[in-house]
Image (tube, rainbow, N blue to C red):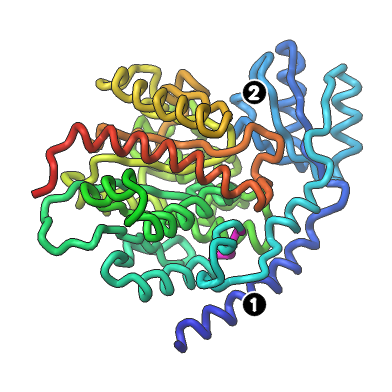
Amino acid sequence: MQFLLILGVLGVLAQWYWVAGSLNTNNDDQVFSITPKTQAEVDVVKNVSSQYETVLWSPAAPEFIREGAEVHLFVPGNSSQAVRELLRTHGVTHAVLLANTKELIEMQTRNASTDPRSGASYYEKYHTLEDIYHWLNKTAMENPDRIKVILIGSSFEKRPLYVVKLSAISTTITNKKAIWLDCGIHAREWIAPAFCLWFVQYSLSFYETNRDIARILDNMDVYVLPVMNPDGYKYTWTMDRMWRKNRSIREDSRCAGVDLNRNFDANWCTEGASHDPCSEIFCGEFPESEPEASAVASFLRRHKETVALYVSIHSYSQMLLFPYSCTRDLAENHAELLLMAKEAALKIKRYYRNVYKYGAGAETIYLAPGGSDDWAYKLGIKYSFTFELQDRGQYGFLLPPSEIPRACKEALVALKTIALRVIEKIPPPA
């Protein structure tokens, strides 16, 4: 009870700090859509995205900007006039993709209930880090035979990294395989932690009635890390909604943070990552230099004989990706992974009439070395995927709460489809 009271106080403080942090937002903040048509225009957009107080939404860094590829650029109100004038001077056209970012941020942070017992609506809202810790504690207490909370490490700022082990009710099976599911490696991708919470609750609620969920949990445990980047996630609620990296600091740089999805030992810091601490794709000082990446890698090393499926949840762009992203070489079982991703994408289209691209990361988007999915694959987890959830830029990282259920249902279809295929390929538990 004392623990829950403390969490309640922290939740109130979090909301207060959010109000303070929101003073940095402006009614004139917008998101531009720009499609450079020539290399000269590419150079202009690269300059705008790196030299002005703007934030690239898509792609992740200026070096990925290409001719004919749409760019989504968050432009604060205090930079808007300068950016518009520069684009106009060089004949680069743009459209306003989002004119109401402040309103969308306020919509995302509006939360009438922090109590998981309040019903399904709890899972149709975004939650502060304190709320999520509260949810972990409450869910574990209410489901002691199904849920176990495991502390696997801590973040740079010493916040705990909690993993939920979700299991069917059974005391006789000892050799079950497992699924690893992580969310929130990039701080601003709020739909990712929302899905992790939604998935756990859905599995608990529908195990008795949903045959797919029952088959998955009867054959596999699921390890769920709801927030892999708690420091960054906290920062997006209190100071900077657009923050991507973790919050580690270096004595030799004014810039904070490492891209945790460039910090794993998979062709670390080659083309597609950066040694510049100020870059959004900064790879860190060495592989697993960041405590968050190191904690996940250590856990998976200890469980590499058990974990048969690795899934990392991201947003946005609606893609189902698999290795490799760190090289243009094809994975050994590329054809098998492609068939799984294709089946999942087709089911999403059939059930929800939404289109997800699918394929190997490097050939589908761009080179991204040091990613967790590639590292897991190289560790020996041969079914490794990254899901990029809704949407394709209509709202981007500011996906409204009203869109959470559909985004989660689409991700669930993909996860169930792939998990059931993996179960067909592994020995049944005894």
Front-lying residue, 174 or 209: 209
Q: Which residue is mark 1?
A: 12
Residue reaching furthest left? 430
Contact? badges 2 and 1 (CB < 8 Å): no
**Span shown in magenta:** 125-129
Residue reaching furthest front? 209
Residue lying at 53% horizontally and 60% vertically, measured from the top left:
231
Q: Which mark is residue 353?
A: none
Amino acid at circle 2: Ile
The CA distance from mark 2 to mark 1 is: 41 Å
Residue lying at 32% horizontally and 56% vertically, measured from the top left:
208
Q: Is residue 293 left or right of residue 95?
A: left
At label 2, counting other C-alpha atoms closer than 10 Å, the crowd grade (few under 14, some 14-19, many 20 or more) is many
Task: Indicate the position of residue 128 as horizontal and vertical percent values.
Answer: 58, 65
Q: Is residue 255 left or right of residue 71?
A: left
Residue 160 vs 282, above or below: the answer is: below
At label 1, counting other C-alpha atoms closer than 10 Å, the crowd grade (few under 14, some 14-19, many 20 or more) is few
Residue reaching furthest top? 38
Residue lying at 35% horizontally and 17% vertically, measured from the top left:
329
Residue 205 vs 43, above or below: the answer is: below
- Mark 1 lies on a secondary structure that is helix
Task: Indicate the position of residue 417 as horizontal and vertical percent values.
Answer: 36, 35
Q: Which mark is residue 65?
A: 2
Amino acid at circle 1: Val
- Please count the marks in the image: 2
Task: Indicate the position of residue 378 as horizontal and vertical percent values.
Answer: 26, 33
- Mark 2 lies on a secondary structure that is loop
